[in-house]
């Protein structure tokens, strides 16, 4: 599974960068099939372009792989299960339940999401990358833990 998530992260960056760098496609009579996972990944900005896309904070986690982007103005976007599920939630006002902690609670399409960010160092269990914050998401009572940072 470790290699699957690393591959997932590399695909996320590569898909978005390749789409930006590629010349316009020539019209063809055949259409290439794009998987739902590829479509979902293409909707997440690459790490080096997330701030320009309006993302304020990004959290990542493993087993199963997930990414949560908290946008500056209007939404929280959650990509779950190695890209199989993409959900946009309205951005609520944050609460601060304890010092050094920020919490968002929101709902969309009958699904509930809670995101808690704690200013406590975190190391990604797969890549070993260090982050300044721990992130916990609870989606429909399913609890997932990971790391994150402002972008």
Image: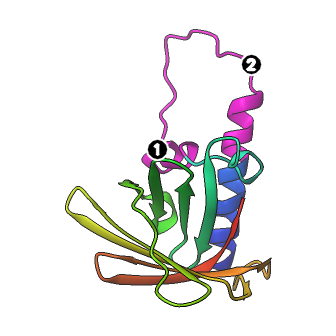
Q: In this view, does 148 lie to the left or right of 108?
A: right
Q: In this view, does 127 lie to the left or right of 28?
A: right
Residue at position x 55%, y 11% from top? 28
| Residue that label 1 marks | 35
Q: Position of residue 123 (x, y in %)?
A: 74, 85
Q: Position of residue 73 (x, y in %)?
A: 51, 48
Region in magenta: 14-43
Numbered circle sitting on residue 2? none
Disc 1, SS = loop
Q: In this view, does 142 lie above or below 59?
A: below
Residue at position x 69%, y 73% from top? 3
> In which quadrant of the rendered image does the C terminus lie?
bottom right
Binning the other alpha carbons within 10 Å of mark 2 as few (below 14), some (14 to 19) or many (20 upward) gives few
Magenta segment includes 101:
no
Q: Position of residue 81 (x, y in %)?
A: 46, 68
* Residue farthest along the left direction in this orientation: 110
**Comparing labels 1 and 2, the label whose residue is closer to the camera:** 2
Q: Where is residue 146 in the image (x, y as percent from the top left)?
A: 59, 80
Q: Is residue 5 left or right of residue 48?
A: left
| Residue that label 2 marks | 23
Q: In this view, does 55 lie above or below 2?
A: above
């Amino acid at each position: 599974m470790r290699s699957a998530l690393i591959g997932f992260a590399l695909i996320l960056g590569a898909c978005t960068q390749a789409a930006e760098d590629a010349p316009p496609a020539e019209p063809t009579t055949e259409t290439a099939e794009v998987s739902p996972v590829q479509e979902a990944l293409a909707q997440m900005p690459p790490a080096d372009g997330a701030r320009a896309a309006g993302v304020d904070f990004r959290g990542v986690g493993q087993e199963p792989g997930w990414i949560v982007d908290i946008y500056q103005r209007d939404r929280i976007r959650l990509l779950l299960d190695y890209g199989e599920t993409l959900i946009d939630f309205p951005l609520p006002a944050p609460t601060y339940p304890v010092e050094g902690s920020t919490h968002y609670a929101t709902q969309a399409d009958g699904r509930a999401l809670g995101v808690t960010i704690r200013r406590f160092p975190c190391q990604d269990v797969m890549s070993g990358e260090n982050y300044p914050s721990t992130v916990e998401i609870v989606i429909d009572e399913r609890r997932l833990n990971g790391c994150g940072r402002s972008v």
